[in-house]
Image (cartoon, rainbow, N blue to C red):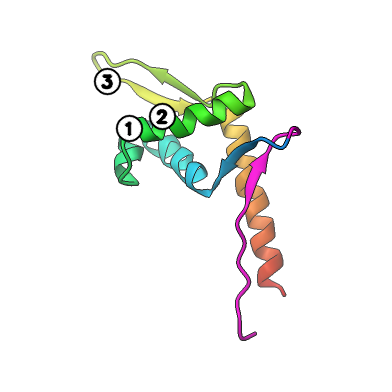
Amino acid sequence: MEHVPKFKMWLEDKEKRYILGKGTADLLLKIKELKSISEAANFYNISYAHAWRKIRAIERSSGQEIISKTRGGKGGGHSELTPFGEKILSEYTQTKEVLEKCIKNL
């Protein structure tokens, strides 16, 4: 094949509201790995405020929290995905993998 097909994928809810795309999925994966919004934002060279705006946008459109935070203290704070955050990230990742496999097999 002379040309390689590519695609852009995102998740929407039943009302067709944007929920999650590649950039935010990558951010959520990094938050899950590092347990820190700040460190994940630094990794992608975006501001902490920008990372939070992305998270809040998903929470507003879905009506559910995707990050749970523990404030700092003796061991410092940390952030992790809520069960809903895990679910949408998993849906995104699995769907993307299936689509990539389909395209690869063309």
Disc 2 marks which residue?
Answer: 52
* Amino acid type, callout 3: Gly
Query: Quadrant where the N terminus lies?
Result: bottom right
Q: Which of the 4 image quadrants contains residue 14?
A: top right
Query: Quadrant where the C terminus lies?
Result: bottom right
- Asked if the residues shown at circle 3 and circle 1 are in contact, with their CB atoms under 8 angstroms apart, the answer is no
Report the residue at 60% width, 57% height from top. 8
Marking on residue 48: 1
Report the residue at 66% width, 71% height from top. 104
Report the residue at 65% width, 49% height from top. 94
Residue 40 in the image, given as x and y percentages of width and height: 35, 39
The magenta-colored residue range is: 1-15
Mark sitting earlier along the chain (2/3): 2
Q: Determine whether 8 is above or below 51 in the image.
A: below
* Amino acid type, callout 2: Trp
Disc 3 marks which residue?
Answer: 76
Give the structural element (helix, strand or loop) at label 1.
helix
Categorize mark 1 by other alpha carbons within 10 Å: few (<14), some (14-19), many (20+).
Answer: some
Categorize mark 2 by other alpha carbons within 10 Å: few (<14), some (14-19), many (20+).
Answer: some
Give the structural element (helix, strand or loop) at label 3.
loop
Mark sitting earlier along the chain (3/1): 1
Alpha carbon separation for disc pair 1 and 2: 6 Å
* Amino acid type, callout 1: Tyr
Q: Residue furthest right?
A: 14
Report the residue at 32% width, 45% height from top. 43
